Amino acid sequence: MQQKKIGRGKAEAAKNNDNGLIETMKPFVTFGVKALAVLGSALVHIVKNIPKPEDHRPANKNDKVIKI
């Protein structure tokens, strides 16, 4: 980013070499990494809680219903 110096004869632009782009983008990158971590952990939690087909056992058919 260039800044004008006031008080000189000609308007000269001084280049600001303080890594402005890195300092500007750092919060956005940090937010993105944390958001991906939250989404990833939620996805792992959902996948772990899906019941497995071999864990499912049907109810016993020996239950008799007596109609009166």
Image (cartoon, rainbow, N blue to C red):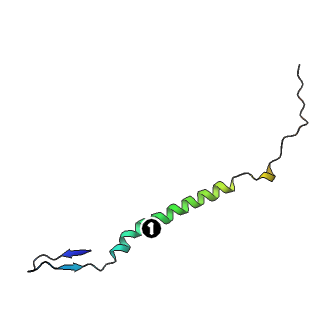
Decide if residue 18 is on the left or right side of residue 56: left
Q: Position of residue 61 (x, y in %)?
A: 89, 37
What residue sits right under mark 1 in the picture? 29
Of the 4 image quadrants, the one containing the C terminus is top right
Report the quarter where the N terminus lies.
Answer: bottom left
Where residue 66 sits: x, y (%)? 90, 25
Residue drawn at the location 31% of the way across and 78% of the way down? 18
The outermost residue toward the top is: 68
Q: Residue furthest left?
A: 9
Q: At numbered mark 1, what does the secondary structure look like: helix, strand or loop?
A: helix
Q: Amino acid at mark 1?
A: Val
Residue 38 shown left or right of residue 31 in the figure: right
Q: Residues within 10 Å of mark 1 (few under 14, many from 20)?
A: few
Q: Position of residue 62 (x, y in %)?
A: 91, 36
* Number of on-image labels: 1
The structure residue drawn at horizontal position 34% and vertical position 77%, both measured from the top left corner, is 19
Q: Residue at x 10, y 80 (%)?
A: 10
Residue in view at x 36 percent, y 69 percent: 24
Q: Is residue 43 left or right of residue 24?
A: right
Question: Vertically, is 17 above or below 47?
Answer: below
